[in-house]
Amino acid sequence: MASKSKNPIWAFLASVKLALLLIALLASTSIIGTVIEQNQTPEHYVQHRGEAVASVIQALNLGDMYNSTWFLCLLGAFSLNLIVCSLDRIPTVIKIVRKDNLATNPDRLAKMKLSKEEKIPGTLETAKKEVMQYLHEKGWKTDSRDKEYGTLFFSQKGPWTRYGVYVVHLSILIILLGAVIGSPTVATKILDNREFAFKGGISLPETAQSDFIFSYADEKKIPLDFTVRCNYFDIHYYPGTSMPKDYLSSLTVIEDGKEVLTTTIEVNKPLIYKGITFYQSSYNQIGAAIIKLRETNSGNVHVFPVDPQNYSVTNTWQEGETDAMIRIQSARQTQMPNGQASTEMKIWLMDSDGPPSMFPLMYGSPVIVERPNAKYELTIGPHFATGLQVAKDPGVWWVYTGCALMLIGLYMAFFMSHRKVWAHVYERDGQPMVLFAGHANKNTLGFSKTFSSLTQGFKKPQNNRA
Amino acid sequence: MMNSSQLFGYTTILYLLSAAFYIGLLVFRNKKVGLVGLILASIGVLVHTGALGLRWHESYQIGIGHAPLTNMYESLVVFAWCITLFYILLELKFKDNASVLGALVMPLAVTTMAYASFSTDIDRQISPLVPALQSNWLIAHVITCFIGYGAFSVAAAIGVLYLLKHLAIKRNFSETNMLSTLPELSVLDDLTHKTIIFGFMWLTAGIITGAVWANEAWGTYWSWDPKETWSIITWFVYALALHARFTRGWNGTRIAWLAIIGFISVFFTYFGVNFLLAGLHSYGAS
């Protein structure tokens, strides 16, 4: 280590000055990207910022600054500094943690900030036993070694907390590593395997399916090794308002022609399948109408797109053991009481359990249809496509692990300390004595209270005996 | 029947009185005056807690139940709650060494409450929650961030007092100057440092809960949106302060200034981003 510290490059990379400089640079340059709108077209910058500024933005890639080479280099330098500075200091910390505290010269104990000397009645041997037992009772497990005039006892708590700051440093590196592992750019350009990590999306019309998605980065297709189908899309509103309460899509995963799983995703409730996550991200209307039937007991939903040019088609489905079918008999334009144009349809619905049901249905307003063995909630509404964001991020667990380590490390570094207690039991002029000494690397005020209650607690029972 | 806005009103009045007594402590140096300030602040926090609970309850009564943490008004009110609660705990822990700080912290709480209650830019209605905010992470994320913000505000307040006292000593102000009521410089310095450490822990937790939530809702734990970026800038500023202290022995005026710079960054993360920049966190703006 001594030779390393002489190497000027190593010393520079390990220096705190460099760390402070890099942190300050990261903090100050990060501001730029919050002031300049990110990921806009070159024309946008010319239009909003003028030619001169736009050329600077272009040259320094400030339009995508957090992915720019110079910013990534800054992060790289920061990581290198973290690694070198930790490697440089950890050997010293290991030495402190492994230090043989029983080698301490008893004379030095008396000079420590926290020390206290007491007489002990009895013989030296009983005094040793008494001190050891007392420390043990108080939760300080001791080691001991014989010294010139007696025995030195030593106990410590939390020497490992000295590693706290390095746990934090390591956690940052793990988070950055996770970011690299999960980066679509790294997957595409370095691993040459776009399916390893990607971010993309797909717009799936209700009843449609897909076995690929489009990458956000270059809009190229990324194949999935399964198929995903959107059964239906739905918007829930807060009662009596037009404020959306939730967007949801019913998705089915199909593998080798078999339906493997069906689930409903919502905002904040994605589907994760084979490491690929499907998020509800948007929606749009792609067709005039779609029939949705929900059987209220089973919760099964059956969906049939309607072609306005040729609406009178019979659609069939199975509900439990029952075969059922539905047809739009006729449709005509009407006006709603509020003046809005709408469509009124005559519906024919029948199943093997009884005579057909015939009833009118307005576009957008649900009706309930009771059958002998089923009860349907039926609507005809716009035909939507659900917008799914699809991501595969194999680095995310690294990032989460790093985050957890960071909190643990910060707690160790800030709220825990390395505490040491010595007790030298010896004889002075035939009188057994004990000299307590203590040291903590942090929260010295708190530890001095612990220390004084420890030493006073030892004195009290003695006084009672005396 | 009492409603939550009335309770928030009483809270503001209690904080105002508390601030007055703390300023009284600074001027008259009578410990009893400070004690009254502490008692008023404590009653205020209790009423405040009740008001937050009531607003939560009211949101369920109108059928859109959610924790009161979802718009600028609610966040300001929670911010004031955090700084006051944090300050009270600080004073209980550090006793007289911290009590004068109330003269700066309580007016901050009052200002926040008053701004939330009277500003015309701020919508005080309980409004339905957009789907993106309907998550169990909402409470964890907002609370961790705001405890951090609260601690950093107090740290900056102590930093200001440190600088004032430092100036007074340098200029040889008389013993009777009211800044002499303040604790020793070394005590203020230590308090600033400890408060920053506490805030740093919570800010870290706040950023992490936010990242986990973002990943759950949008599929990206980090997207460099302005709020995220400013939170990491803030994190860097305090990381800088902690390293400068631990490894280069910075203390005194330098740490006081860093506490103030850090707070400016917090302030920008909290307000500046909402009002000046657009981004994913834009729902916090109204």
Image (cartoon, helix red, strand yellow):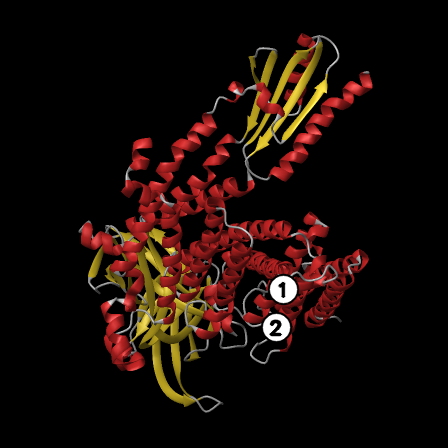
Give the residue type at disc 2.
Answer: Ala
What residue does disc 1 label? Answer: B80
Judge left or right: residue A195 versus residue A378.
left
Question: Total label count?
Answer: 2
Residue drawn at 68 percent across, 53 percent down = B183
Above or below residue A12? Residue B66 is below
Could you say where residue B34 lies in the image, as x and y percent from the top left? 76, 58
Q: In which chain is the residue bearing label 2?
A: B
Could you say where residue A359 lies in the image, as x and y percent from the top left? 43, 78
Q: Is the residue marked by circle 1 packed among few (<14), some (14-19), or many (20+) residues within 10 Å?
A: many
Could you say where residue A411 lies in the image, as x and y percent from the top left? 52, 42
- Location of the N terminus of chain A by quadrant is top left
- Location of the C terminus of chain A by quadrant is top right
The first of marks 2 and 1 along the sequence is: 1
Give the residue type at disc 1.
Answer: Ala
Above or below residue A79? Residue B149 is below
What residue does disc 2 label? Answer: B116
SS for tag 2?
helix
Closest to the observer, A421 or A187: A421
Closest to the observer, B89 or A52: A52
Closest to the observer, A352 or B232: B232
Judge left or right: residue A248 versus residue A421.
left
Residue drawn at 71 percent across, 20 percent down = A118
